[in-house]
Image (tube, rainbow, N blue to C red):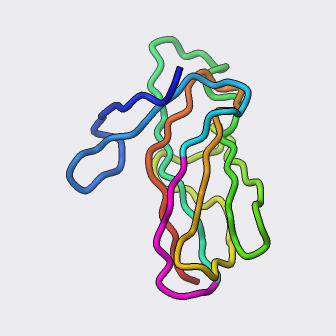
Amino acid sequence: SNWTATTNADFYGEYVRSAYYIKSGDGNLKATWNVPVIKAGYYDVYFHYYKMRSRRRDRKEDSGEYNFTIYGEDGPEAAALAAQNAEEGWNNIGSYYFSTDTAKIELSNKSELKYIFADAVKIVAQ
């Protein structure tokens, strides 16, 4: 199975609030963002987290993490966002130096969570 497009008012988007989601797996499937970098420097990388509303207050829904790979100056670096500590909306997943004109950020489907939502990323110059 691959990434499936979905829309929801809680997703981030200027016109269409959409995202892609996938069932978690072994990490072989990735969502990739290529974010334009205006000038070389340190940037905070943010991920827009969507909290799935579950009918049952199933604690297990929240235990797991989102696993990212950030391609900065120092090569690929792993970053993780724990679902239970994540705020709905923008979450800082770390600071990285980008020297090229594009910051590549990957989200893997490797997780204990049932579903992974690839919503949006942004970088903010420090």
Instruction: Report the span colored magenta.
Output: 32-41
Residue 54 image position (x, y, % from top left) = 47, 19
Q: Is 81 left or right of 123, judged from the image as shown?
A: right
Which quadrant holds the C terminus? bottom right
Q: Residue at x 35, y 50 (%)?
A: 12
Residue at the location (75% across, 61% down)?
76
Q: Majority secondary structure of the magenta segment?
A: strand
Q: How many numbered marks does the figure carry?
A: 0
Of 66 and 106, the residue lying toward us: 106
- Farthest residue to the left: give it: 15
| 94 or 61, nearer to the observer | 94
Residue at the (68%, 64%) spot, across then down: 71
Which residue is at a point 69% across and 44% down the rendered structure image?
67
Residue 99 falls in image quadrant: bottom right
Q: In this view, does 53 lie above or below 38?
A: above
> Is 113 placed above or below 77 here?
above
Question: x, y (%) of residue 60?
Answer: 67, 19
Residue 92 position (above or below residue 112): below
In which quadrant of the rendered view does residue 93 lie? bottom right
Residue 39 highlighted magenta (yes or no): yes
Percent x, y of residue 1: 53, 19
Q: In screen coordinates, is 74 left or right of 86? A: right
* Residue furthest to the top: 56
Q: Please state if 70 lies on the left or on the right of 78 as rendered.
A: left
Q: Nearer the viewer, residue 66 or 89?
A: 66
Q: Position of residue 100 (x, y in %)?
A: 60, 79
